[in-house]
Structure formats: structure tokens, C-alpha cells
């Protein structure tokens, strides 16, 4: 990364940083995407089970992994301030934290998943797939969390193409092991949806080992000696990472968990509704990788400029990121609306599931604009290390506005399951408005000083 002078240069720099992140995010998401897609081709019951399992897995994993995202602004600001010698310690402590978080999640799932599933009115076959899918995925927790820490370090140095290369390898590895373990090919056991969990866990180990090898042997990472001379576990450094990371994690958890909560609450409508809802969410989440990637790019670029005390450049990067995401949101909405029948047909041949999924995809098209605003705004705020007020706003938007609106509409009106999607639109819109206001306030305060 380097200093840019004009808005055109900034836009080119944003694209340079974001494109590899986008490919990386899509590649990493394809692990979950192919779990859902390949399971959908296996059976509707297994699809429902994996959907329920993912609804527990994704928010817990993403929320805690979000804590590790603080490594990106910390390292970016250290590099902007030319404090290269402090990067090694920050990353090593981040790896320690990754292992601790992975163990916490493993213990949580081991003791709580059966009691949690018993609270939901699920068919026995669906509940069994959900439980075993989560247990299978748990074998990949440590490498998944460690890779997240390493990736944040790689991206903070502006080497997002390396993350792209590593993540591109994950999709074919995952598809290969899913092919073996879901369908029982080449003499492997036929495990259905549970096989998708084991396939993902194996993939995470491969991806982490590749990242370790690159960081240890290739420039510019080799010069930092990340895996040599390990420092002792420092609670002071862990506290610094956590003070920034925990609010980030809570904000991400608040956003992702509302989608999972909606999936779980829709379980009362039956297996077909769960399957149709998951198809719509799965494809929409794939499109969300674009604003999410712009958000991560904004964190890197804003953090770099703030570290160098070029606050006007940081402000310009913030709003260029928002403008870019909004522009692309219209393309996403068009794809969802105009190709909704084809999208649903990719996942299943069940006419009842397709008919319902097509209707859900219309609602998905409607919240593309809100997603496109709130994601890069959150990314910019993380670049400023402004995370505490942000997570409060996220909690209010999604859980005080979004989910209650969805519950009221589904319970007391004729919208039924569609009421939850209207609630999602309301929550995401509220988040976009409040977070934009917060970013503007932060930038005005900096300008005033």
C-alpha cells in the first residue's frame, strides 16, 4: 500500500485491495455454499438438518472469529506508523487467542447442542443430521480460527492476493471431500449431510497448513519471523486485541445470528419452509461477499491512513467504499429478482421448495441496498478503531427492531413466514442509517481537532 493523492487513485487502490479479498471471501464461503448445495441434491431432510446445524454453527463461529478481525486494523496502523517491529508480537498473540476461542466453541457445542436442538420442534431425522453435522465441523475449529488470524495479518500488509490464492484452493478441496463423504463414492461411507461437515473440517486443516507454509517461507511475510521466537502469552496484548475485537465480534454476531434465529423460528413451518428459506439465504449470502469484501478493504485502507494521520484520505476512502458497494447492490438485486426461478432450480427439483424459495428471493432482492451501505460503513469504523458504539447500534437494529418486527408480522398478520423477511429488511435498513450517522460523527470529531 502507498499514499494516494486523488479520488481516482483511491478508487483504483480500493479495487486493487478489494478484488483479491472478494475472491477470498467467495472461495471461503463456497465451503458452506457447497455444503448446502451438495446436501440439497442428496435429500430435503439432510438439507433441513444441515440448515439447522449451520444456523447454530455460523453465528457462533463468525461472532468469535470476528474478534480476530481486530488484528487487521492493529497491524495496518502499526505499518502506517512504521512500527514494523511490533507486528510479530501482535500476530503471535492473535494466534494464541485463536486457539483459545476454538477450544471455547468446541466445549460449547459438545455440551450444549443436544439441549438446544431439543428446544426446537424438529423431525427426528433432521435433528440427527443437525447434531452430527455440527460435531463433524467441530474437528476443523482450531485450523479455521488460526487461519482467520493469519489471514488478517496477511491482508493488513496489503497482500490480499495471497489470501485469494490460499482460499481459492479451499473450494475444490471441499467439493472433493464432500463428493466422497456425502454420496459415499470410491468406497467411502455414505454420510449425507454429516459428510459435508467432515469434508469442511478436512478442508480447514489443508487451508491452515498452506497459510503457515507461505508465511514461513515467502516474502514479505518471512522477514517478520512470525513462527520463530514465540513470546509468552501476554494478557496485556490479548486485552488490546479483545477491546477492539470483542465489539467487532458482537456486531458481526448480531447481524449473522438474526438470520440464524429466523431460520430456527421458521422451523415451526416445517421442513419445506426451512429448505426454501435456506436456499434463499444461501445464495443471498454468496452475493453479500461483495459488500463484505469492500468492508474489509475499507478497514485496511482507512486503518492505514489513520495510522499515518492522513485523516482526510481516510474519510475519502470511507465514502468511496460505500459508493462502490451501493453501485454493485443494484446488480445483485437485479440478479435475485430476474433469475429467482433459475436460482431455486439450482438447488432442488422439489416443486414445493422451488415455489417457496422463489418468493423468498424477492424479499432478498429488496434488502441489497441496505446491506451495501451498512457493511462498508462498519468496515470504515473498524479502521478508525471505533467499535463500541457500533456494536450497540448493530444489536438495536437487528435484535430490537429487525427480529421483533419479523415475529409480530409472522404471528399476528397473514404474512406468516414472509413476515420474518420483512423484519430482516427493517433491521438491515435501521443498521445502515444509524451506522452511517455514527461514521459521519466520528469524521467530524476528527476534523474538528
Image: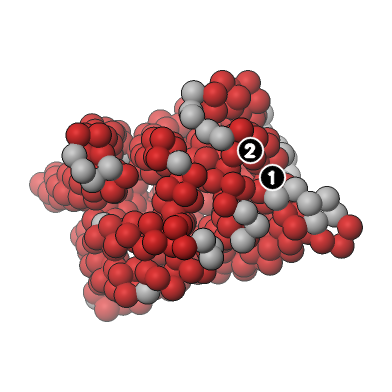
Circle 2 SS class: helix
Q: How is the image coloured?
A: secondary structure
Which residue is pictured at 38% across the width and 57% down the height?
356
Find out whether the residues at labels 1 and 2 contact each other: C-beta distance under 8 Å.
Answer: no
Which mark's residue is nearer the viewer, 1 or 2? 2
Q: Where is residue 186 drawn, in percent x and y?
A: 87, 62
Neighbourhood count class around disc 2 (C-alpha, 10 Å): few under 14, some 14–19, many 20 upward: few
Give the residue at the far right of this rendering.
Answer: 187
Instruction: Indicate which disc residue 343 carries.
Output: none
Which residue is pictured at 68% across the width and 37% down the height?
132
288 left or right of 404 in image: right
Give the camera-side residue of 422 and 66. Answer: 422
Neighbourhood count class around disc 1 (C-alpha, 10 Å): few under 14, some 14–19, many 20 upward: many
Give the camera-side residue of 354 and 440. Answer: 354
Q: Where is residue 375 drawn, in percent x and y?
A: 32, 54
The quadrant in which residue 283 appears is bottom left
- The answer to whether one can see residue 125 in this image is yes
Q: Where is residue 139 drawn, in percent x and y?
A: 71, 39
Which residue is pictured at 19% across the width and 34% down the height?
412
Residue highlighted by disc 1:
194
From this view, report whether residue 224 is shown above or below residue 392.
below
Q: Where is residue 103 drawn, in percent x and y?
A: 64, 29
202 left or right of 266 in image: right
Instruction: Indicate which disc residue 125 carries.
Output: 2
Quarter containing the N terminus:
bottom left
Number of marks: 2
- The answer to whether one can see residue 143 in this image is no
From this view, report whether residue 193 is shown above or below residue 175.
above
From this view, report whether residue 257 is shown above or below residue 439.
above
Amino acid at each position: 500500500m502507498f499514499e494516494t493523492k486523488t479520488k481516482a487513485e483511491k478508487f483504483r487502490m480500493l479495487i486493487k485491495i478489494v478484488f483479491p479479498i472478494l475472491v477470498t471471501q467467495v472461495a471461503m464461503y463456497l465451503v458452506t455454499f457447497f455444503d448446502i448445495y451438495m446436501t440439497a441434491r442428496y435429500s430435503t431432510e439432510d438439507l433441513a438438518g444441515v440448515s439447522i446445524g449451520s444456523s447454530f454453527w455460523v453465528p457462533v463461529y463468525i461472532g468469535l472469529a470476528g474478534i480476530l478481525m481486530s488484528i487487521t486494523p492493529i497491524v495496518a496502523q502499526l505499518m502506517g506508523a512504521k512500527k514494523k517491529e511490533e507486528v510479530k508480537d501482535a500476530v503471535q498473540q492473535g494466534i494464541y487467542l485463536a486457539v483459545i476461542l476454538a477450544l471455547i466453541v468446541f466445549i460449547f457445542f459438545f455440551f450444549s447442542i443436544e439441549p438446544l436442538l431439543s428446544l426446537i420442534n424438529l423431525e427426528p431425522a433432521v435433528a440427527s443430521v443437525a447434531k452430527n453435522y455440527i460435531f463433524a465441523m467441530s474437528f476443523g475449529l482450531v485450523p479455521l480460527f488460526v487461519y482467520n488470524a493469519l489471514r488478517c495479518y496477511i491482508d493488513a500488509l496489503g497482500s490480499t492476493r495471497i489470501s485469494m490464492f490460499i482460499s481459492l484452493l479451499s473450494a475444490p478441496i471441499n467439493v472433493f471431500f464432500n463428493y466422497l463423504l456425502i454420496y459415499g463414492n470410491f468406497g467411502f461411507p455414505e454420510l449425507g449431510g454429516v459428510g459435508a461437515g467432515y469434508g469442511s473440517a478436512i478442508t480447514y486443516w489443508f487451508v491452515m497448513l498452506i497459510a503457515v507454509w507461505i508465511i514461513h517461507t515467502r516474502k514479505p511475510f518471512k522477514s517478520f519471523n512470525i513462527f520463530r521466537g514465540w513470546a509468552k502469552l501476554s494478557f496485556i496484548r490479548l486485552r488490546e486485541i479483545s477491546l477492539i475485537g470483542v465489539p467487532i465480534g458482537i456486531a458481526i454476531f448480531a447481524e449473522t445470528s438474526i438470520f440464524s434465529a429466523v431460520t430456527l423460528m421458521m422451523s415451526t413451518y416445517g421442513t419445506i419452509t426451512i429448505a426454501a428459506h435456506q436456499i434463499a439465504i444461501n445464495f443471498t449470502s454468496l452475493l453479500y461477499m461483495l459488500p463484505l469484501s469492500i468492508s474489509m478493504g475499507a478497514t485496511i485502507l482507512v486503518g492505514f491512513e489513520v495510522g499515518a494521520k492522513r485523516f482526510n484520505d481516510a474519510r475519502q476512502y470511507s465514502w468511496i467504499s460505500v459508493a462502490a458497494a451501493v453501485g454493485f447492490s443494484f446488480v445483485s438485486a437485479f440478479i435475485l429478482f430476474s433469475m429467482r426461478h433459475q436460482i431455486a432450480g439450482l438447488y432442488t427439483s422439489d416443486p414445493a421448495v422451488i415455489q417457496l424459495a422463489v418468493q423468498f428471493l424477492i424479499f432478498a432482492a429488496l434488502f441489497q441496498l441496505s446491506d451495501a451501505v451498512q457493511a462498508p460503513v462498519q468496515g470504515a469504523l473498524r479502521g478508525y478503531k471505533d467499535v463500541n458504539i457500533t456494536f450497540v447500534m448493530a444489536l438495536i437494529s437487528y435484535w430490537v427492531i429487525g427480529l421483533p418486527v419479523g415475529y409480530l408480522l409472522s404471528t399476528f398478520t397473514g404474512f406468516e413466514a414472509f413476515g420474518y423477511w420483512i423484519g430482516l429488511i427493517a433491521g438491515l435498513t435501521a443498521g445502515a442509517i444509524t451506522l452511517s450517522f455514527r461514521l459521519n460523527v466520528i469524521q467530524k470529531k476528527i476534523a474538528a481537532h
